[in-house]
Amino acid sequence: FYLFLRWWWLVLFCAALSGGFAYVNSSMQEPVFQAVSTILISEASSAKGVDLNSLALSERLARTYVQLMQSEAILSQVVARLKCPFDAQTLAWMLQVQLVKDTQFIRLSIEDTDPVRAAALCNLIPEVFIAYNNSTQSSRFIESKKSLGREIAALDKQIEQIESQIAVLFGNNDPSALNKRSSLDSDLVRLRQSRSSMVQSYESQRLVEAQTLNNVIVVDKASVPLFPIRPRIHRSVTL
């Protein structure tokens, strides 16, 4: 205690000097801002359930989405669209994607020295990912829908041709003309039934597609951060 009383001024001087160094060091560091957004993974209606298998599937899907959002395929598009002065690999270091425990939420955060760019990046990454995800899932149905569309178009052309032939024969009571018209009427009924069946198949395909698509919804968009997360000058000086 006697030594403390004798050297108190030295202890105080060292503390002040340490605080001064901490203040100068923190002041020289470039401020880093953090923007945060949250997205919700909404499962396809055909995949919903309460059994253990569906829960395990949900967890795997969410983990897959976390990895995809950090992939170069997504981040390179984001960098290009915002014309960032860095590449996708640098953006990956700035980005953190985490699952919120026991939920279907995914939390994205971006740390950047530019607060406006941080918010823009944090909002654009989910936007690019949603477009990529929808395109990837929909590609499974593109060919079958195209094929049905071509068949419907071909049936429309045949129906139009038969209707034209029937119109030409209209009012002609010659027996051969009447027989021809009767045959054309039968063909027209058959083609219209086929077309109706094709349209139903097409709509069924669209319904299946809608039911098997996993939706990604942005529930909390990032706003421009007002204060940096580091350096925390006052905290550094206090410590």
Image (cartoon, rainbow, N blue to C red):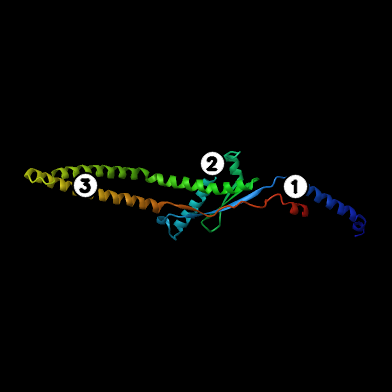
Q: Nearer the viewer, residue 67 or 215?
A: 215
Distance, label 1 to label 3, CA atoms, is: 80 Å
| Label disc, if present, on residue 102 of the rendered structure | none
Looking at the rendered structure, the secondary structure element under dot 1 is helix
Residue hosting label 2: 81
Locate residue 133, reporting x and y percent.
46, 47
Looking at the rendered structure, the secondary structure element under dot 3 is helix
Query: Residue shown at 38%/50% (left/top)?
Result: 209
Locate residue 175, reporting x and y percent.
6, 45
Mark 1 neighbour class, 10 Å CA radius: few under 14, some 14 to 19, many 20 or more: few
Mark 2 neighbour class, 10 Å CA radius: few under 14, some 14 to 19, many 20 or more: few
Q: Are marks 1 and 3 in contact (CB under 8 Å)?
A: no
Q: Nearer the viewer, residue 127 or 166?
A: 166
Query: Residue shown at 90%/57% (left/top)?
Result: 4
Distance, label 3 to label 2, CA atoms, is: 49 Å
- Sequence-wise, the earlier of marks 1 and 3 is 1
Residue 191 located left or right of residue 115: left
- The amino acid pointed to by label 1 is Ser
How many numbered badges does the structure rendering display?
3
- The amino acid pointed to by label 2 is Arg
Q: Quadrant of the N terminus?
A: bottom right
Residue 200 located left or right of residue 120: left
Q: Are marks 3 and 2 in contact (CB under 8 Å)?
A: no
- The amino acid pointed to by label 3 is Leu
- Sequence-wise, the earlier of marks 3 and 2 is 2
Locate residue 32, reporting x and y percent.
67, 47
Residue hosting label 1: 27
Residue hosting label 3: 191
Q: Nearer the viewer, residue 48 or 80?
A: 80
